[in-house]
Image (cartoon, rainbow, N blue to C red):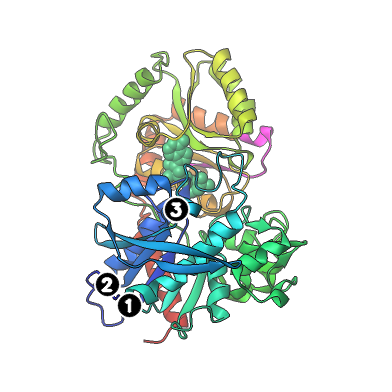
Amino acid sequence: MPESTAAVPANPRCIAVLHIASEVAPFIKSGGLADVAQALPAALRRLGHDARVCLPCYKRVYLEADRRGVRWLPQPMIIESGGVDHRVGIGLVDLDGLPVYLLACNELYDRDGLYGPSQHQDYEDNARRFSVFSKAALALPGAIGWAPHIVHAHDWQAGLVPALLERGFNRALPATRSVFTIHNIAFQGSFPPHDMRLAGLDPWLYNPMHCEHFGRFNMLKTGIVFADRVTTVSRRYAEEIQTSEFGWTLDAVIRHHAYKLSGITNGIDPIAWNPATDPHLPARYDVQDLAGKRACKQALRSECGLAPYEGACLVGMVSRLTEQKGVDLVIDAVSPYILAGRMQLVVVGSGDLYLEHRLHALQQRHPGWVYVWYGYNEGLAHRCIAGSDLFLMPSRFEPCGLTQMYAMRYGTLPLVRYTGGLADTVVDVTTGAGNGFTFGPVDLGHFSSVLDRALGLYQYFPAEWAAAQRRGMTTDFSWDRAAQHYAELYRSITWP
Ligand code: ADP
């Protein structure tokens, strides 16, 4: 039942590419992957390529899809996994010109969580859920009468796609090539060996050169091994994951496959993240006139119940609350600066319970100076990024990171550890042409000293601060540059 495809852009060298991701904004989002899975195909379409995206239809996706007028195709696909047949329905939503396919299988995806009932727990049938997702994504082109040149799989949840393609799972796509992007190598989709039968891959592939990793079936490794090209979301992260410090035990595998690895630094969505038009903000502004930013700061202070103390630098953080993000360093470091009246802190995030408890204790110690909002809140995230002067990302590792780029676009100077995508995007003000603050080793001494340096610049050198703001606001972080690099990569492994 061929389905009438979205208008293919007029580009004689148009590349057809299917993005396969477990989350896509604005349907569902737990982190930066969702932003990328929406923005990259959209940017590729702007360049004239036929990019589309598919994702599992979780419970919350149904709601958003209904709101946007989803169209369900009449025939479901039958996808086998471990001897069980699953009926997978196909929904199509037009997301401002980007075709988004929803793969619906209620027994697997119609649940409140994406990967588990809570952030701290995984679903026991995740191997089955994402085996079926990968197989359904590869069966999708046949079901809609389309043959992509490239399937572009993201993270472990789609890690089986390159392997299934290479092993001939979909014989209708003999010439299709695969690209696999690692958004965070710390999450690998590691399962007991017998779960490999759910994937339908030959059992002999259960060995350390292919799908096995330290006695487990590893979906991320499977993607890396079988993909025609592997990318990471920043240039520096592509180098870092080849070392034992950042490779999360896969560094040797990455080094072995380094010949096909490259790093392409993410962009940001310039429409969703624009201080001149952002509907979440109480006042708008741009690089010519920052009066609106001052209004946003005042409004954030009152929204968060912070003392109206003008001299203090308003410091923000919007993040998953995990050790990766260096939240513990922030908690350990800030008290002396707060007590000295130099900074106030707003944190928006959720994650590890012990960090939430420690943040709660910090807020109790400094009422009116620290505010923490636990959970996911898109509007407050925008207001925090706009209303803050300084934005903290002291990550232990950061594959790319998007929020530091949002911060710069909103005239908020980022303070980051010099790692991964943070190192690719933030330049320290000491260079004379910087847009933020960077530090190296992750320890309290180094973090405190860079925080002290940032607060000093804010307090005593407003002209230099404003110059750094301007440089950040005018840096080009658009997706078009990154999408161009992806298009070149696709071109290097396909035919027209
Ligand atoms: P990661 O993917 O490692 O979580 P990124 O910086 O790449 O980090 O992306 C995080 C994305 O999630 C950003 O768009 C950020 O604004 C958003 N985000 C993180 N925590 C929250 C929260 N508590 N509320 C709203 N948005 C959040």
Q: Say whether disc 3 or disc 2 marks the residue closer to the N-terminus.
A: 2
Q: Position of residue 86 (x, y in %)?
A: 49, 63
| Residue at image coords 45%, 81% | 176
Image x and y of residue 180, in percent? 53, 68
The magenta stretch is 436-447
Q: Whole-Å distance between the Cαs marked 3 and 2?
A: 23 Å
Disc 2 beta carbon < 8 A from ligand 1? Answer: no
Q: Amino acid at mark 2?
A: Glu
Which sits earlier in the primary sequence, circle 1 or circle 2?
2
Could you tell me if the residues under marks 1 and 2 are in contact, i.e. CB atoms within 8 Å? yes
| Mark 1 residue element | loop
Image vertical order of residue 26 relative to residue 52, above or below: above
Q: Which numbered tag is attached to residue 106?
A: 3
Q: Nearer the viewer, residue 347 or 221?
A: 221
Magenta-drawn stretch contains 209: no
Kind of residue at disc 1:
Gly
Q: Position of residue 232 (x, y in %)?
A: 54, 62
Q: Nearer the viewer, residue 360 or 223?
A: 223
Residue position for label 1? 145
Mark 1 C-beta closer than 8 Å to ligand 1: no
Q: Which residue is mark 2?
A: 3
Question: Residue 113: which numbered mark, if any?
Answer: none
